[in-house]
Image (cartoon, rainbow, N blue to C red):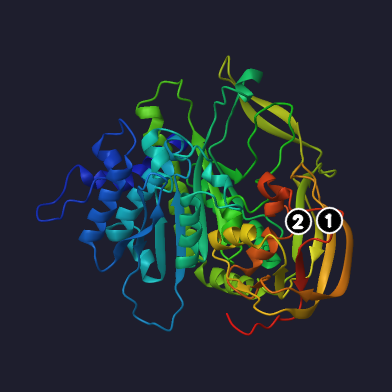
Amino acid sequence: MMRLLLQKIFIVITATYSVLCAGQVVPLQTPLEAARYARISTSSEISGYLHALAGRYPMLTRVELAGNSVQNRPIEVIRFSAPRRDHTVKRLTVMIAGSQHGAAEPAGGEAMLMIARELADGYLRPLLEEMDVILLPNANPDGRDLGRRSNANRVNINTDFVLLTQPETRALKEAVERYAPHVLLDSHESAVLKRESLAKDGYLTDFDAQFEISNNPAVPAALRDYALNIFLSALTARVSDGGLPARRYIGEITSIQQPVTNGGLTLRNFRNAAAMTGVLSLLVETKLDSREAVHPTYRNIAQRVARQLLCLHSLLTLAHERRAEILAQTALARAMLHQEPLTLYAGYALNPAQPQKSIVMRRLDTGELEPRVFPDHRLQINADAAAFPRMLVITRHQDVIRSVLERHRIDYRRLLHPSEQQVTAMRVNVPANSLVRAGLLAEMQKTLTIDRGSLLIDLLQPNGRTAALLLDPRSISSIFRYPEYAGLVEPEEEFFIYRTFEEVLVSQP
């Protein structure tokens, strides 16, 4: 039943490419289609396809450069926007990014090329009357062409959004800022066969599609509530109705003994980092079939792309239908970014109301499905609330901190003359384990003489909420949770970054 329904949406997109009426323009084949699903597309093929599509439909779409990879391959977006009939009407913008994990998870990027064609001149074209769509199908072009999951520096770019050490993660972050989407989907696949972990217990995971919201507790509360209880519920129902069973994300299972949780809570993940701009941000993960099984196409890529197509199609159509409420929810969230208190810590704990969770797994030896019971740790615990400051004052280690600010495009000023200011000071202990709460040893209000050369960060800027989380050692997304910066926090001394709830005036920028 599910296979037939998946094939149906696949046929809707591909059927017109076998027989065409005389006089019609021949639609572009994607590189995957041209290769007859015998291999995945190369980065240059993806770029060529995007430019060819934009060349055919110049009034609807154009290709823009988001950045370059470590090996200087272009990271490109294709942008769809129909001519506006009424410029007073606010349009919804949806952004979809894929292939952060390169050749290991290519199906989302391949599906986006088909989605792009349908937006330009197919069954999705009517959506562009009320919304704009931004597709970034190849976020890790080096990984795709080198046949690996990481980038050319062997960094998992999907967990680099706190430090932003890689050009690919900076390109993704800057694309979110440039296009200011109201909805963002980060597309992934997940291998059912984990040879080095779960397979040693004799099992494979068994799922089809799962979605997660931006669950960091510093995301404005109303947006988190809407994402989880309204939009996510509707999205998983729509995908399931389309023939692909979908659920909320359950974290990667690598052992039959482990507790289960939902998705990661920190800003190191793309969906949570993007949500600090007030976007309705989600992740999708579809099944990546075992490479050891026999499939009708290369690593079952046709079926994997069909799963992604259904998920992306469902996201676009649902966002279009709910565009008015999404615009209202994101407008409210953006208004609250510089007002709502910060919740700095989040973690998972055993759910006393439901201490166990039964999950269907597949036996590796027989291939049969078998329910397994796991401790249920999906109860999210939030703590360490703090009022949102007006400014941050950085009194030491300015050069080290400045490099982080510049990677995040956080504006700052350097104090040219000494100044006195009422500030909140603290002493804090940061544990070696980044999942453990930091200890607030002391907190006090004081008058501080701020020396010349100190850095001032006005938090009433687009990246202000991100700055407040990155630079507070109590935050689970703090740079001080990383070895490169942890040594800057000295528990026996006042922390060198102070919070103030009044503007610190400077004579010059």
- Residue 305 in view: no
Residue found 52% across the figure and 52% down from its top: 238
Mark closest to the chain's N terminus, 2 or 1 = 1
The quadrant in which residue 23 appears is: bottom left
CA gap between label 2 and label 1 equals: 7 Å
Q: Residue furthest top?
A: 365
Amino acid type at image mark 1: Val
Seen from the viewer's position, the closer of residues 41 and 21 is: 41
User: Could you tell me residue 251's position as x and y percent?
Assistant: 65, 40
Foreground residue among 174 and 218: 174
The residue sitting at 39% across, 47% down in the picture is 138
Q: Mark 2 — residue?
A: 473
Relative to 165, does residue 357 appear above or below in the rendering?
A: above
Residue 435, position as x, y percentages in the image: 75, 44
Q: Label 1: state its secondary structure.
A: strand
The crowding category of the residue bearing disc 2, from other C-alpha atoms within 10 Å (few below 14, some 14 to 19, many at least 20), is many
Residue extending furthest left?
22
Q: Nearer the viewer, residue 380 or 387?
A: 387
For the C terminus, which image quadrant? bottom right
Callout 2 amino acid: Pro
340 sits left or right of 93 in the view: right
Residue linked to disc 1: 428
Residue at horizontal 30 percent and vertical 64 percent from the top: 61
Tell me the SS state at disc 2: loop
* Residue 15 relative to residue 115: left or right: left
Q: Is residue 56 above or below residue 269?
A: below
Task: Report if residue 95 is visible in the image.
Answer: yes
Please state the horizontal and vertical placement of residue 235, each as a whole percent of the image: 55, 54
Q: Residues within 10 Å of mark 1 (few under 14, many from 20)?
A: many
Q: Are marks 2 and 1 in contact (CB under 8 Å)?
A: yes
